[in-house]
Amino acid sequence: MRTPCTQCPLRKLPMFSGFTEDELAFMNRFKVAERHVERGATVLKEGESSSELYTVLSGQGIRYMTLENGRRQVINFLFPGDLAGLQGGLTGEMSHSVEASSPMVLCVFDRARLWELFRNQPERSYDLTWISAVQEHFLGETIASLGQRDALQRVAWALLRMHERLSALGLLEAGSVPLPFRQQDLADALGLSLVHTNKTIGKLRDAGFANWAEGRLTVTDRRQLAKLALVDLERVEVRPLM
């Protein structure tokens, strides 16, 4: 069954900016379907055009590019509330692929009506611009910023930010959140080797700061993890929702 935008569970969360009545009515028309995908399924494929845009309603995924040697390079991660396919909707061709790391439910929007949104919904159009700028980076953080941290600090930062993000989405249970990615995915996104990433995660576990195992991430000492990551503990930034 399709979830009406008026009953969207994400829209009720404090981390997302609100809708006016007019915007909500438009989004309810803009959404044409829901798509259910299994873990490991390709949602969008690099080099192909996309006739649809998606907002993640539930589940998690990855964006990745295929390198010249055939290896996969993870760009960043998809969480509930994130938009996928915007690049293909604007330029006609995807420069990266999107894969489901867990079962996902996607809100489907018709690419052909994208320009209608730009004409009639200026606030929503600005939100698209913001989303487009932010989604190019790993959790909104530039590579230059990550480059100022060593491996331990990078992994600590990533685990803390993902735990904060998923907690704000209401997915926190007994101190842990679902994190279905592979360590290789995180290593790629942070520019580290798998061996180095594995050892670093082990150090954080042994120090009693965080533990990522069996698809769940537990942060046991947020303050120390934040100190190690060179960041302040803060509320998750309010962001637009399409």
Image (cartoon, rainbow, N blue to C red):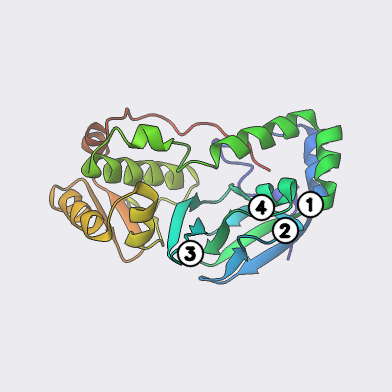
Identify the mark nearer the N-term, 4 or 3.
4
Marks 4/1: CA–CA distance: 9 Å
Instruction: State the residue at coordinates (54%, 67%).
Output: 103
**Marks 1 and 4: in contact by CB < 8 Å?**
yes
User: What numbered label is drawn on residue 101?
Assistant: 3
Disc 2 secondary structure class: loop
**Marks 2 and 4: in contact by CB < 8 Å?**
yes
Pointer 1: what residue? 111
Instruction: State the residue at coordinates (46%, 41%).
Output: 139
Marks 4/3: CA–CA distance: 17 Å
Question: Is residue 17 in view?
Answer: no
User: Looking at the picture, which amino acid does disc 4 mark?
Assistant: Gly
Identify the mark nearer the N-term, 4 or 2.
2
User: Looking at the picture, which amino acid does disc 2 mark?
Assistant: Ser
- Decide which of 212, 7 is in the foreground and name it: 212
**Marks 2 and 1: in contact by CB < 8 Å?**
yes
On the rendered image, what quadrant is the N terminus found in? Answer: bottom right
